[in-house]
Amino acid sequence: MIDLLKKIFGISPKINLADIVKEGAIILDVRTKGEYASGHIRGSINIPLDKLAANLNKFKGKNKAIITCCESGMRSASAKGILTSNGFANVHNGGSWLSLRRKLDIY
């Protein structure tokens, strides 16, 4: 069951997200502007999920690593789906922004 959930949400234990960030990955927070304003990962960009499809032109190059995050991991999984279905090849679901921040040790 856990493996199925990891597959659905795009979480892979083999990928070290901290290494990807060190290599220049974009951290994309897809929460609302208000949620983002209440706390976020330093250096992340905020494009709410409902505005993501209309803002794909803000990403330069479809091979650059992108890590999505949100409050719980649900919207970030949807964001990963939107990005990959539009040709972005290196997208990772980081899950909740708080969990991702702890993994990256970025405060």
Image (cartoon, rainbow, N blue to C red):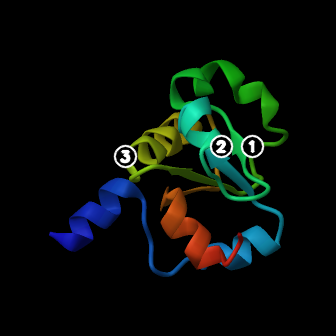
Q: Mark 2, mark 3: which one is toward the viewer?
A: 3
Q: Are marks 3 and 1 in contact (CB under 8 Å)?
A: no
Give coordinates of residue 81: x percent, y percent: 47, 40
Q: Is residue 9 left or right of residue 47?
A: left
Who is closer to the viewer here, 90 or 29?
29
**Where is residue 56 drawn, in percent x and y?**
70, 28
Query: Could you tell which of marks 2 and 3 lies nearer the N-terminus?
Result: 3
Total marks placed: 3
Q: Earlier in the sequence, mark 1 or mark 2?
A: 1
Near mark 1 (Cα within 10 A), the count class, few <14, some 14-19 or many ≥20, is some
- Amino acid type at circle 1 is Lys
Residue 4 lies in what quarter of the image?
A: bottom left
Q: Which mark is residue 62?
A: 1
Residue 47, given in percent of the width and then of the height, sits at 65, 33
- Amino acid, disc 3: Met
For disc 3, the neighbor class at 10 Å (few under 14, some 14 to 19, many from 20) is some
Decide which of tag 3 and tag 1 comes sooner along the chain. Answer: 1
Residue 72 on image: x %, y %:
39, 53
Residue behind mark 2: 88
Q: CA distance from mark 2 to mark 3?
A: 19 Å
Q: Secondary structure at mark 3?
A: helix
* Callout 2: SS: loop
- Label 1, label 2: how many angstroms apart (C-alpha)? 4 Å
Q: Residue at x 21, y 72 (%)?
A: 2
Residues 94 and 80: in front is: 94
* Residue holding disc 3: 74
Q: Quadrant of the N terminus?
A: bottom left
Distance Cα–Cα, label 3 vs label 1: 23 Å
From what the image shows, is residue 91 above or below residue 60? Answer: below
Q: Residue furthest front?
A: 38
Quarter of image, res 17: bottom right
